[in-house]
Image: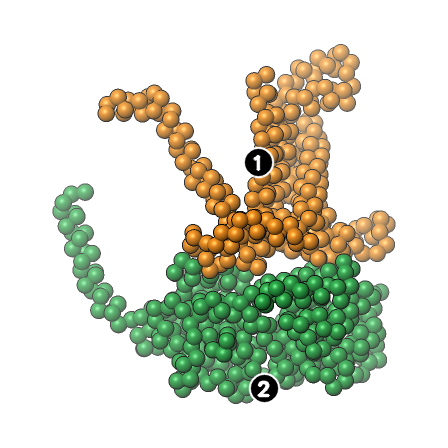
Amino acid sequence: MRALFSSLRDGKGFDISLIAIAMVFLILFSGAPLVYNAIMSFQEVDIFNLGTFIRPWVGLDNYRSLFADPSTLPIFWNTVVFVFSSIAGQFIVGFGLALFFTLKFPGAAYLRGLFLVSWVMPGLVVGAIWNWILSGDFGILNHFLKSVGFISENIFWRSDINYSLWAVIIANIWLGTAFNMILLSVGLAAIPRDVYEAAELDGATAIQRFRTITLPMMRSTIGAVVSLGLIFTLQQFDLFAAITSGGPANSSNVAQYKAWEMSFREYDFARGATISVLMIVVVMIASIIYVRSTKQEVRG
Amino acid sequence: MGNKLKLMLGGLLLSTAIMASPTLAEEVTITVWSLDDENQPAFNYAKEFSEMDNGIQIEYREIQFDDVVSESMRAFATGKSPDIIAVDNPEHALFAGRGAFLDITDKIAASTIINADNYFAGPLNSVSWEGKLFGVPKATNTIALYYNKDLYKKAGIDAVPETWAELVDTARKLNDPDNNVYGLAFSAKASEEGTFQFLPWAQMAGGGYDNINVEGAVKALDIWKTILDEKLASPDTLTRGQWDSTGTFNAGNAAMVISGPWELNRMLEEAKFDWGVALLPVPEVGSARSSAMGDFNWAIFSNSKHPDEAFKALEYFASQDDRLFPEFGQLPARSDIALPPTGIALKDAALKVFQEQLKYAQARGPHPEWPKISKAIQDAIQTALTGGATSKEALDLAAAKIETILK
């Protein structure tokens, strides 16, 4: 008994109990819902048997009917376009801003802090504001593009099937840029100044310095930013709800919004879960790649 | 904790229990969930009912429109549902068809206050399932055509459109892109609102949710497409709800709008022009009329422990129906209540038209799988209007989907 206590207080038992607490939390709040969700995707679930665990088992029927639906593939394709364009946009603009703020000019630190405001705002508020900006008849964006002379006729960002997905992407890039910038700024600050000074003395140009010093030394930060970006983008729901509701004609619908529609508009929880399972698989593959790519970094 | 303290606490608990028990035995508490806030009927009725000396207390909870179904179904699934709920009428059958609502046919037959014959056919149909009554209509509404009289005068139009062809024609005449004026505003949004606006057109032309691909319904969708293709209505019609669409009418950016009586108070405040309301245009001169039917119903959950008390509350709510319009601006779902004039000329004239239009209002469904049926119709509207398929193809696909649901 005493040995157990002393091990718990100072020894292996202590280590194990620390890990155990974290594991219990993980299993309880992440593992169990994931498994529950996966099980639901093999059952027939509607709102009346939602509270019970014993529900009709339908095997792969939910997956079959999902892929038999002609709207499914375009929605998955939209998801790919949304994720890649959003991450690319957020990353490029965010990196640009981060580099810009490494220049020491008066007020740089305050200005950088101000950019975080967009990240702090709730998605639904951001969505509502972009809803006005992107509005077809009286939107500011159209007014601006028209007065600059880029367009002669209003673009109906939210209602034209060629633009609706891009309307949400634009808003999402705006929303996520600040977060990218802050993480990348931290990465930039961690690079020792003297490396640059030495390179400068050796006659390296700004572009060469960026390619051979900044990018390689930022590898793990960039990896983290992109994988977090993937997760945040796949979670993005509020903007769709606020701007296009996935419409018109599913042209801006993505997997995560569709999953919600299935579960809470049509009350078909099983098929909502089915989409979630497919998304989990994608995120898992991405995290495995991420973990493996940063592993070498740590050892090296 | 010292033993003395424990003893004292125990004694205290005991004495409160003894003091509280006599009142607990007499008072029955029932719970009511509705989306009404303190300016709307249910909140006030519940308060008044609690204040009456009848031994029944109401615990009132306000829920958001979007949460009504999911919240209450979760509550029902876990056995914690309220006694009474106000539910949107197309979703009534979802509950009734699965046995979640109490069959109150006999209670209504025995009631001296609620008489089923007094209700309009449409609302009454929405609380029915397989010939039984599973609730009482709370209020009702419908849609009609609002038009800007000043713009009519300016365009030299003196007749309100009565047929679909006339509607398109009038919209063309009123359309004025240079001044940011669209001929018409309505909602073809991919939500229940889109179904709500389209179904009346299909019904007037002999269709319905169970035969959505009849020739007349195809023609209706073609007309919607013409209106959008010629930009007689804003392209944002596809993603905008009725409230926002009517906002453009109030601002003078649309000459006509299809919407309901819930807009009246806002329009009186916002619209700086003379306006009127007309019945929805029909396919041809002399065609049968139809319109949508909206608003909520009362129902008692089947697992309520106090069904009799809950029904008494419903009786009280129904007995106050004559206050709906004067106090809260809502239309009672009953034909036996005469609505007194408000003294506001525009409102009184509009009210007459809406009451006439209500006679033709048809319930959506009722069917327990209504959300899925509605989704099929929304998909068809959106596919056709964005050019993904012809109206016929889109509606054929919707009809096929609905058929598998109805089987």
- Which colouring convention does the figure follow? by chain
Q: Which chain is green?
A: B
Residue B63 percent across, percent down from the top left: 48, 62
Q: Is residue A83 above or below residue B247?
A: above
Q: Is residue B146 above or below residue A182?
A: below
Chain under disc 1: A
Taking the spot 66% from the left edge, 79% from the top edge, the residue there is B290
Chain under disc 2: B
Taking the spot 53% from the left edge, 49% from the top edge, the residue there is A59
Disc 1 target residue: A284
Give the secondary structure at mark 1.
helix
Disc 2 target residue: B341
Residue B213 percent across, percent down from the top left: 71, 70
With A145 as the anchor, is B217 left or right in this view? left
Q: Is residue B308 above or below residue A170?
A: below
Q: Residues within 10 Å of mark 1 (few under 14, many from 20)?
A: few
Chain A colour in the picture: orange
Taking the spot 72% from the left edge, 73% from the top edge, the residue there is B214
With B280 as the anchor, is B16 left or right in this view? left
Q: Quadrant of residue B80?
A: bottom left
The kind of residue tagged 2 is: Pro
- Whether residue B201 is visible to the viewer of this picture, yes or no, is yes
Q: Quadrant location of the C terminus of chain B?
A: bottom right
Q: Quadrant location of the N terminus of chain B?
A: top left
- Depth check, mark 1 against mark 2: the one in front is 1
Query: Which is nearer the eye, B107 or B397?
Result: B397
Give the secondary structure at mark 2.
loop
Q: Quadrant of residue A156?
A: bottom right
The residues tagged by marks 1 and 2 sit, at their Cα atoms, a distance apart of 65 Å
